[in-house]
Amino acid sequence: GNKDKETADAVVGLLDDADAELRLAAMKAAGKLHVERALPQLVDRVRLGGPEADVAAQAAARLGTKGIRALQDVMAH
């Protein structure tokens, strides 16, 4: 319902936060809560590499088929 949309909006908004700990928590939440709208941002984090890439990849994989396909595309490049 409306609360789910608000939660998803909050999670997506925190994916670009300046605070690394908040970003990591948001990535984990996006995967756990299956926030599919977060997928483009998660894939971008994977492409950038670095310490957040693993967390972003795990979160994307938890989004199901769409997430796994997106990760496969990233790995192909």
Image (cartoon, rainbow, N blue to C red):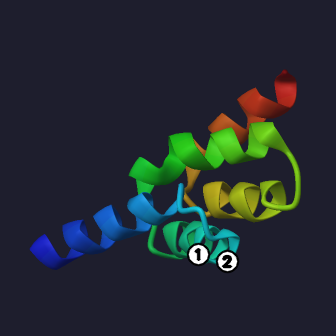
Please report the residue visible at 17 percent of the width from the left and 78 percent of the height from the top. Answer: 3
Answer yes or no: is residue 1 visible.
no
| Residue bearing mark 1 | 22
Q: Amino acid at mark 2?
A: Glu
The mark total stands at: 2
| Mark 2 surroundings within 10 Å by alpha-carbon count, few (fewer than 14), some (14 through 19), many (20 or more) | few
**Image quadrant where residue 72 sits:** top right
- The spot of residue 73 in percent (x, y) is 73, 28
User: Could you say which disc has been placed on residue 38 in the image?
Assistant: none
| Residue bearing mark 2 | 21
| 23 vs 62, nearest the viewer | 23
Which residue ends up furthest to the left in the rendered image?
2
Please report the residue visible at 47 percent of the width from the left and 52 percent of the height from the top. Answer: 38
Q: Is residue 47 above or below residue 13?
A: above
Q: Secondary structure at mark 2?
A: helix
Q: Secondary structure at mark 1?
A: helix
Does residue 43 appear to the left or right of 33 in the view shown? Answer: right
Which residue ends up furthest to the right in the rendered image?
50
Answer yes or no: is residue 45 visible.
yes
- The spot of residue 77 in percent (x, y) is 84, 21
| 14 vs 68, nearest the viewer | 14
- The spot of residue 2 in percent (x, y) is 11, 72
Q: Amino acid at mark 1?
A: Leu
Which residue ends up furthest to the top in the rendered image?
77
Q: Is mark 1 in CB contact (under 8 Å) with mark 2? A: yes
Q: Marks 1 and 2, Cα distance to the nearest angstrom?
A: 4 Å
| 58 vs 18, nearest the viewer | 18
